[in-house]
Amino acid sequence: MAAVPTKDDVIDMQFFFCPTDGSLQQLIRKKQNHTASFVFGIGSFLQKKPKISASRRLFLKTKILKKASTLLAEEKEQKKIDRERTLSERVPPLKLSGLSVQDLQILCKELHQKIDVVDEERYDIESKVAKNEKEIADLSHKIFELKGKMKRPALKRVRVSADAMLGALLGAKHKESIDFKANLKTVKKEEEKKEEVTDWRKNVDAMSGMEGRKKMHPYRFFWMSKYKLFLLRHGEGAWNKENRFCSWVDQKLSENGVVEAQECGRLLKEQGYQFDQVFTSILSRSIQTAWLVLEAMGQEWVPVTKSWRINERHYGALISLNRAEMALNHGEEQVKLWRRSYDITPPPIDESHPYYAEIYNDRRYSTCDVPKEELPKAESLKEVLDRLLPYWNDVIVPVIKSGQTVLISAHGNSCRALLKHLEDISETDIVNVTLPTGVPVLLELDEDLRPVKPRQLLGDQAKIQAAIKKVEDQGKVNAQNK
Ligand SMILES: O=C(O)[C@@H](COP(=O)(O)O)OP(=O)(O)O
């Protein structure tokens, strides 16, 4: 402990509470060395003057306490002022008056971007702290182990040769001398394997679980999302209800489908989401769903862009057939392969099919970016992805990257194809991904449009699970609505 300063040494004396033990302390700064501080307990300070009476001591203590409490209050007040000053410097008050809705939206976006940046910094700092804490814990553990090794029981040193020791162990018969060194193995000191620090974003192979998504680095889930993308399978269509393959036949929403779409819009509104652009297929059920969602959200003005490339998978000759009947005739396994496999294409549609003319004579298919003759006659999920990807890359991605929030109102399989691409789902695992009607799927993506979190199906989770099961069961012999 530092020497007790004399009266001449002292330039400043303060009393304060010690936060660690709650005792009253005295802080004295030395004259010669302004950087040095000495702290003495009040007890010991007072003990140095034994002549002091009890009442005087009490009086002093009370005075010191009063002074300390005033100082504390002042310090608290000062901290408050400092905090407010720093906040007003770093976070200037928002000037909202006179701003148009568009300006407000831009401001909101800017603020969100700032929050994202701060969160990323916070995340970085937190992970650094966690890493350092782990290192400290490891080092403490090593120290503990070393200390343990130091406390070996004191052994008596005995000078005995190896031969003498063998003799003692094996008895007097032992005569040979043994070269112990010859039997010693050379053990290389194992180099401590250093954990490789890589950019987790590049670690696609390490992505994990979640319905077949490849393993994802756990930290990735804590990364802040840069973009939000919403995928939506339209509300129930008339043929969904009848359990018929609808595909490119332009069925409208069922009554229930209308309600599903409206409820979806209400939910998104409740949760405060706003869209800047909506993309749909050129099939009425996805367009109708987009309208109903926007209407329920009060965002009817949001631009809607349509493309055949977002259309449902072309189910070829299966179009209009009942799934349960198909399961009865061809087996549930076969129906599952047709419905959910990645690269199995169902038999193609031809002119003899009852819906061929209705599909291919429809004017909408002469507006596509490929000649009518080149439009598919049946598609596997892979083929859906092949025709969807150019549109995604060339049209939708730039919109998302410009900072706009996008809703894609599409179909079961066009959404599955996109999910496979975005979440890097394997060909075998995509079989297990099923989307219910009218349930928005929220994807949070990083700057390269890779998911940073598991996809979220928004809404009542029990209902969603039941709806998924219902869709899966459509391909079973005993499905409802045969
Ligand atoms: O074509 C259809 O009937 C369904 C998908 O059928 P499954 O792949 O579920 O058999 O597409 P959607 O209702 O999403 O437009």
Image (cartoon, rainbow, N blue to C red):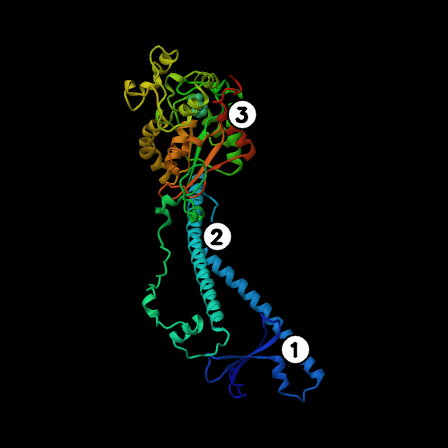
Q: Which residue is nearer to you in this view: 322 or 418? A: 322
Please name the amino acid that badge 2 sits on: Pro
Q: Which mark is residue 93?
A: 2
Horizontal side of 402 relative to 262 (left or right) equals left
Q: Residue at x 49, y 73 (%)?
A: 152
- In which quadrant of the rendered view does residue 75 lie? bottom right
Measured from the top left, where is residue 216 in percent x and y?
Answer: 41, 44
Q: Which residue is nearer to you in this view: 26 or 77? A: 26
Q: Which SS class for mark 2?
A: loop
- In which quadrant of the rendered view does residue 17 lie? bottom right
Q: Which residue is nearer to you in this view: 275 or 416? A: 416
Please name the amino acid that badge 1 sits on: Lys
How far apart marks 1 and 2 lie (CA) works out to: 43 Å
Which residue corresponds to mark 3?
259
Res. 279 visible in picture: no
How far apart marks 3 and 1 lie (CA) works out to: 74 Å
Measured from the top left, where is residue 134 in percent x and y?
Answer: 45, 60
